[in-house]
Image (cartoon, grey):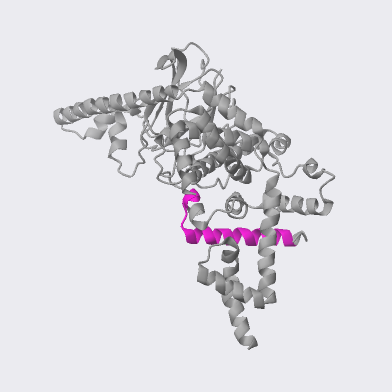
Amino acid sequence: MQKDDRQLQRTIRAAQAGDEQAFEVLLGALEQQVYRLIYSMLRSREDAEDATQETLIKLWRTLPSYRFECPILPYTLHMARNVALDALRRRASRVQSVSMTSEDEAGESEQWDIADPDEYADPARDYERGERIRGVRAAIDELPPEHREILTLKDIEGYSYEQIGQILQLEQGTVKSRLSRARKNLAEILKARNIF
Amino acid sequence: MEHKHKRACERIQPRLSDYADGELNKRQAAEVQAHVCSCFACASELERINALRDLMREAAKVQEMPARVHASVMQAIGNMPRTAQKTKASHVVWLRRLGGAMACVGCLFVIGVAVLTGGVGNKAFDAIMPEANAPMGSAPEAADDADAPYVDADSPDYGLNDKPDRYPEEPMDPEVPMEPGTAPMAPGSSAELEQPEVLPPQASEVGKTYTLQRISGESEGLDGVWTCDELKISFSSDVQRVKVWFARESSREGSYELTDTELIVCFEEGDRISFDMKMEEGTLWLTRK
């Protein structure tokens, strides 16, 4: 583990010095987590891809000022979260603006990417399980962004309360209570749909 | 016996999530484990928690980041040497120093006027530094504000020192044209570079004044001197923090978080620029032609 940490530190330092190959290695270790967190908040592939790209470019730009005060993953995820929040604000603005001119267009352009029916069209997959997973995804989509975010960090990424507190800048007690509310909320939606 | 078991359930059940999350210490975990082995209800609840988490993980599996994002990032950073960033940052530092120097001169002048007229400095200050035009001179106000967040231009703070951000709860002011390209630029905004662009205050931004001026610029980087259009951004000193967000077709995009009252930031033709004020103050979109 320590060896891995040292290796990671060397990679970060090389990337800080401008080594693009080192940065690419670093990206390999971070990008999926960044994308999943952003996707959990934005629920649109296109927006998530844009925001992920913005975050990772920002990481490259700001890496020289990274001082190893906290691990690189929470540092990057915090950055990703801010980028996603900006995107949500812009989206809120666009929805408002467009709805003033054309409600149909607004509905079309801002419809969230809830679930792609083709994603589970793989015949090798068990149909019922696919349906259930699709139901879970749709239920997650119904949650407010802060609940989706914390469920992603805990239940999907498996971070500790402490790590989540670092990413979201919240007290551990708040992390715990928010997580509890998010799970309860999700469970209620799933129960209402007879999924769980 | 049954009563004792019920009390044990009441004590254990709130900890089941923590147990499933691996957040209990060894002693607490052993206690929960022992109880779950002998309690069907708690075992079922734990099973339910784990099953839901497994389903969520399964649902998340399809959300892998497409490889093209990785490729785009690498391409973008290849096209964007850090020297350009440093050059932009040097503008900011230069302006900050210039702003400080001008502010000192301004202060001395104001004090002189006040002494000569025997009046209050504020009135004279208002007269020589109208908010709409010269926020640079108001730099001391910002500097005096001990609570104002300070962001060093050489090491922009996108990291953990930020105050926690909030989720947008409601759409912003409907009167502000938000769609890119719909924000009203001043007449002649796409004219010559020397032509200043003055953006009128928006309805949602009462008390905020912006002055945008396009100037041509040259920046020196390791890869040589390169020319770009620059946008001078001035804003009133009571705005403590402004985020300038930009996106461009060549996939170079990002944002600058600024605390100075006057800055020059380098943009390219076709950039889509927005000023992200505090959430409750709305967002302003501009599209340059």
Disc tally is 0
Depicted A195 relative to depicted A2: above or below: below
Give the residue at the far bottom of this rendering: B1
The answer to whether residue B44 is seen in the rendering is yes
In the image shown, does B4 or B99 lie closer to the viewer? Answer: B4
Q: Is residue B185 left or right of residue B123?
A: right
Q: Quadrant of residue A24?
A: top right
The N terminus of chain B lies in quadrant:
bottom right
Residue A173 in the image, given as x and y percentages of width and height? 49, 61
Q: Position of residue A153 (x, y in %)?
A: 57, 51
- Let me know if residue A171 is in the magenta part: yes
Main SS category, magenta section:
helix
| Viewer-nearest residue: B83 or A7 | A7
Tell which of B128 and A119 is nearer to you.
Answer: A119
Tell me: A185 left or right of B275.
right
- Picture quarter containing residue B108? top left
Which residue sits furthest front?
Answer: A3
What span is in magenta? A166-191
Magenta highlight on residue A126:
no
**Which corner quadrant of the image does residue A97 belong to?**
top right
Q: Nearer the viewer, residue A88 or A7?
A: A7
Q: Where is B247 relative to B192, above or below? A: below
Could you tell whether A172 is left or right of B262 in the image? right
User: If the image is split into quadrants, where does the C terminus of chain B sit?
Assistant: top right
Tell me what residue is drawn at x 20 percent, y 26 percent.
B109
Residue A193: x, y in percent?
A: 77, 59
Q: Is residue A57 visible?
A: no
- Residue B30: give x, y in percent of width and height: 56, 72
